[in-house]
Amino acid sequence: MEIPKEIKGYCKKCKKHTLLKLKAYKPRKARANSKGTRKNIEKHKSGYGGKAKLIATVKKQNKKPVFMAECSECKGKQYFVIPKKMKKVEFKGQH
Ligand SMILES: [Zn+2]
């Protein structure tokens, strides 16, 4: 599905609707000492040999697209999710 690069949406900082520029979301690197990371390492180390059980995973075909939205007025950035599952996401006029 094609999505326009600029969407009118609510900005939490300005507390009103403004033009939001959409950019692809990139997850940052996980912190080394966060609780989730420590728990995951512990899980893999435990037991003789220390290996977590492999669970058969099914890759999801359709996901809700996630973006970073930049406000055109205050330049604040926020997480932006389109609440609909899509197979393929493209910005309009990008081929
Ligand atoms: Zn704003």
Image (tube, rainbow, N blue to C red):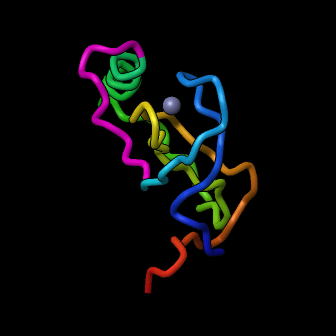
* Residue 34, image x, y percentages: 34, 15
Q: Which residue reaches farthest right?
A: 84
Q: Give the percent coordinates (x, y) of residue 5.
A: 51, 63
Name the main secondary structure of what is drawn in magenta: loop
Q: Is residue 76 above or below residue 35?
A: below
**Which residue appears at 56% of the width and 47% of the height?**
19
Residue 7 picture location, percent across and down: 61, 54
Query: Furthest-bottom residue in view?
Result: 95
Give the left or right position of residue 62, taking residue 37 as reference: right
Residue at x 43% of width, y 31% of height: 74
Is 43 placed above or below 17 here? above
Q: Is residue 30 magenta?
A: yes
- Identify whether 29 is placed above or below 60: above
Q: Tell whether position 5 is magenta.
A: no
Looking at the rendered image, the quarter that the N terminus falls into is: bottom right
- Horizontal side of 66 relative to 46 (left or right) equals right
Give whichever of 9, 73 is nearer the camera. Answer: 73
Total marks shown come to 0
Taking the image as shown, residue 70 lies to the left or right of residue 33, namely right
Where residue 59 appears, x then y in whole percent? 59, 62
- State which region is magenta: 24-35
Identify the residue shown where x is 48% and y is 52%: 21
**Along the line of sight, the residue nearer the viewer: 42 or 80:** 80
